[in-house]
Amino acid sequence: MLRGLCYLWTASLLPITFSGQLHSELTGVLDDCFCDIESIDVFNNFKIYPRIQKLTERDYFRYYRVNLNRPCPFWADDGHCSIKDCQVEPCPESKIPVGIKSGNYNRYSQVANAITDIDCEQAQDLGAINSTLSNYSKEAFEDWARHDDAQDHFCELDDETSPDADYVDLLLNPERYTGYKGPSAWRVWNSIYEENCFKPRSVYRPLNPLVPPRGGDDDGEGFYNWLEGLCLEKRVFYRLISGLHSSINIHLCAEYLLAEGWSKSLWGPNVQEFRQRFDPAETKGEGTRRLKNLYFLYLIELRALSKVAPYFDRAFVNLYTGDRQEDRATKELLLQFFNETKAFPMHFDEKSMFAGQKIEAKTLKEEFRLHFKNISRIMDCVGCSKCRLWGKLQTQGLGTALKILFSEKEIKNLPEHSPSKGFQLTRQDIVALLNSFGRLSTSIHQLHSFRALLKEKR
């Protein structure tokens, strides 16, 4: 019945058709879900992608505060990438909107939104906004701060007050191939897969797709038989990480350094690189699985976005930058975007996860959370600053999505006219969540382009 609804809804939009081995295998219903890839393609490329692009260009979502100088907690620093395209340009203080650099205290304050023409010194002192708030609001803000430390975070969060943390303009530091590769990159992904993805001891072959396949019966699609023996939660965990890795690889293939010049470099799609990573013939069938995991991750984050919509529906929640007209337009765009996410009929059902006996389910959920938190710490070991920036942002975005999925009761019980002690999102969470989903949406859109390029080459 549900699948029928999904196909009926898809038929009302323009179909996308391609030929070739990649398309013939990248089709049909996803494992652990009830939706098909064709429906997601149409929904994303026609409905979601245009809206998320506009949204992430707004001032509220384009500035992300990050500490790119935290030391790697797991091994001696390999040294940072010396290629010029690895570098991240921090945003000058003068370019950051007043309402963003004034901190988190005014993130939902209508009083703050009524303030105009605030100069930089006043913005820095907007902790003094407390003097314009009621005692009730002061207590609510203090509760938020205390609760932040007690929440079940899925990520190792940066200290935003650290002098090493900078605001970065994401539009001026796009995610693309910088030339960062080799042992340093291999070690990061190897640590993520081998130490955190619940790999059985009986499986000897590395999970890391960067490891070249060897001959033998355990290569290719047959290698993944072990995955079907895992419980749903551990299987989901692996698929999330694989999907994230696939998405990042698609971005690197789509924005590849084709030619380097003194004044300007040339970036564009590298079809051969894409084939090496995803073509079924080049990867012994594994590439198709990697791409299906991308779609799976997309559904997970889409589900989180549709569930968190009531959090933003409340009138007092404002995406504050200090520009009243900008903030009003951004909030309107965000609510329109949420309406689209809720319209998709085939969301992932997270209720099937951690649904066993209470003690076992609680233990498994905590293990799931700690494994993911460990992966967020590994991102501080990435040697390329630009890769580290986008790795940290996308893991925080996925961590925020997981936090939302497992906070159903708290979201349902949100007070309409006041902050919530049970569930909250920082500005960093919100920026990471929307931008990380924007990256997934872009990946699926770029797949459309690569299929067309492959078709032309044939």
Image (tube, rainbow, N blue to C red):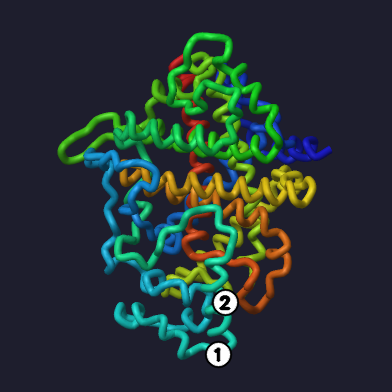
SS state under label 1: loop
Residue at image coords 43%, 44%: 378
Which residue appears farthest toward the top when viewing the image? 216
Q: Is residue 42 visible?
A: no
> Type of residue at label 2?
Asp
The dot on residue 399 is none
Q: Is residue 448 left or right of residue 160?
A: right
Decide: few, some or many residues near mark 2? Use Cα within 10 Å; few <14, some 14-19, many ≥20.
Answer: some
Q: Is residue 169 above or below residue 21?
A: below
Residue at image coords 39%, 33%: 187
Q: Is residue 147 visible?
A: yes
Residue 165 falls in image quadrant: bottom left
SS state under label 2: helix
- Residue 406: image x %, image y %? 67, 55
Separation of disc 1 and disc 2 at Cα? 14 Å
Residue at image coords 54%, 18%: 280
Residue at image coords 51%, 39%: 244
- Residue 432: image x %, image y %? 48, 55
> Type of residue at label 1?
Ser
**As rendered, which of 363 and 26 lies closer to the eye?**
363
Q: Is residue 398 left or right of residue 116?
A: right
- Residue 336: image x %, image y %? 60, 59
Q: Is residue 330 above or below residue 190?
A: below
Residue mark closest to the camera, 1 vs 2: 2
Decide: few, some or many residues near mark 1? Use Cα within 10 Å; few <14, some 14-19, many ≥20.
Answer: few
Which residue appears farthest toward the left when viewing the image? 262
The dot on residue 143 is 2
**As rendered, which of 31 and 110 lies closer to the eye?**
31
- Residue 11: image x %, image y %? 71, 35
**As rendered, which of 400 and 205 lies closer to the eye?**
205
The dot on residue 134 is 1
